[in-house]
Structure formats: C-alpha cells, structure tokens
C-alpha cells in the first residue's frame, strides 16, 4: 500500500480526469437533442460542437497512459488505477445532476462558461502533471 504522499500526483491526475469527465460527458450526451429540437440549430453545427468536445475528452484516455509516469513505484499501479477509475466514475455520476441544477437555476447558456472553466482547469491540471512527469527522476541507487 503506498503512503499518502505517494498518491499526490496520481491524485492530481485522477482529479483532472474527474473534471474532464464531469464537463464532457453531459455535453456529448444531452445537448445535441436539445440544440436541434428546441433551439433549431442544424445537425451539422451541433455535430461539429459535439465532435470538438468529444475530441477534448480524449485527454481523459491519456490519463491511464500517464499514470505509470507519476507513480512513485510501479507496484502502486493497482491503487493508482483504482483512484483514477473511481475519479472518472465520480465525474460521470455528478455531471448530469450538476448540469441539471445549473441549467434549471440559470438557464442553459450558463453551462457554457461552466464547461469552458472545467475544460481549462482539467487541461491545466493535466499540463501540471505533464510537467512533473517530464522532470528527471532521482536515481534509485
């Protein structure tokens, strides 16, 4: 079992993944129908927006690839994978009610800055973790 300090960077990676899932899943699933049927946007315009957001969600697939680079020891991979997987599940679970609350309280246009802030924060956290992984590690012996 890794010590708590050994999970700081995997935890940061997991938090970024959670946030990325939180802001991308509902955007991919919910708005296309809403924008086409209720707001009259064309299917091609909605498809383009959804595609861009889907592309941004690929940054989430990179989280599992980056995990070995942020682990203190590779035998912590089981715990690291669990933390990341649970963070993604948490993002999926929280996103629909959160988006529903925002849309109900302030309207659907309020989701745009929420999504933008979430994506910028998630990408920023991933870049921070990326900077950490690009530094040379001290030698083992």
Image (tube, grey):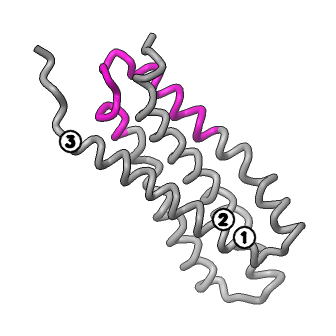
Q: Position of residue 115 (x, y in %)?
A: 63, 66
Q: Which residues are magenta?
A: 65-89
Q: Are marks 1 and 2 in contact (CB under 8 Å)?
A: yes
Distance Cα–Cα, label 3 vs label 2: 35 Å
- Residue 56's tag is none
Residue at horizontal 59 percent and vertical 84 percent from the top = 44
Mark 2 surroundings within 10 Å by alpha-carbon count, few (fewer than 14), some (14 through 19), many (20 or more) = many
Secondary structure state at the residue bearing disc 3: loop
Give the quarter of the image for residue 103. Answer: bottom right
Q: Is residue 3 left or right of residue 101?
A: left
In which quadrant is the N terminus drawn? top left
Residue at horizontal 16 percent and vertical 27 percent from the top = 138
Residue corresponding to mark 3: 135
Residue at horizontal 69 percent and vertical 59 percent from the top = 26
Position above or below: 42 against 90: below
Q: Is residue 91 left or right of residue 35?
A: left
- Residue 111's tag is 1
Q: Position of residue 67 (x, y in %)?
A: 37, 35
Distance Cα–Cα, label 1 vs label 2: 9 Å
Which of labels 3 and 1 is toward the front? Answer: 3
Q: Position of residue 120 (x, y in %)?
A: 51, 64
Q: Is residue 96 left or right of residue 13?
A: right
Mark 3 surroundings within 10 Å by alpha-carbon count, few (fewer than 14), some (14 through 19), many (20 or more) = few
Q: Position of residue 27 (x, y in %)?
A: 66, 65
Give the quarter of the image for residue 102. Answer: bottom right
- Residue 27's tag is 2
Secondary structure state at the residue bearing disc 1: helix
Q: Are marks 3 and 2 in contact (CB under 8 Å)?
A: no
In which quadrant is the C terminus drawn? top left
In the image, farthest residue toward the right: 104
Among numbered discs 1 and 2, the one appearing first in the sequence: 2
């Amino acid at each position: 079992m890794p010590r708590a300090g050994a999970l700081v960077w995997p935890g940061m990676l997991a938090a970024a993944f959670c946030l990325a899932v939180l802001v991308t899943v509902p955007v991919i699933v919910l708005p296309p129908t809403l924008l086409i049927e209720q707001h009259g946007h064309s299917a091609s315009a909605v498809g383009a927006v959804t595609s861009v957001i889907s592309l941004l969600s690929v940054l989430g697939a990179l989280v599992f690839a980056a995990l070995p680079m942020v682990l203190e020891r590779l035998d912590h991979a089981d715990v690291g994978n669990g933390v990341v997987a649970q963070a993604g599940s948490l993002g999926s679970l929280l996103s629909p009610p959160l988006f529903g609350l925002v849309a109900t309280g302030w309207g659907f246009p309020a989701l745009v800055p929420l999504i933008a802030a979430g994506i910028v924060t998630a990408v920023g956290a991933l870049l921070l973790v990326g900077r950490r992984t690009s530094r040379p590690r001290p030698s083992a012996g």
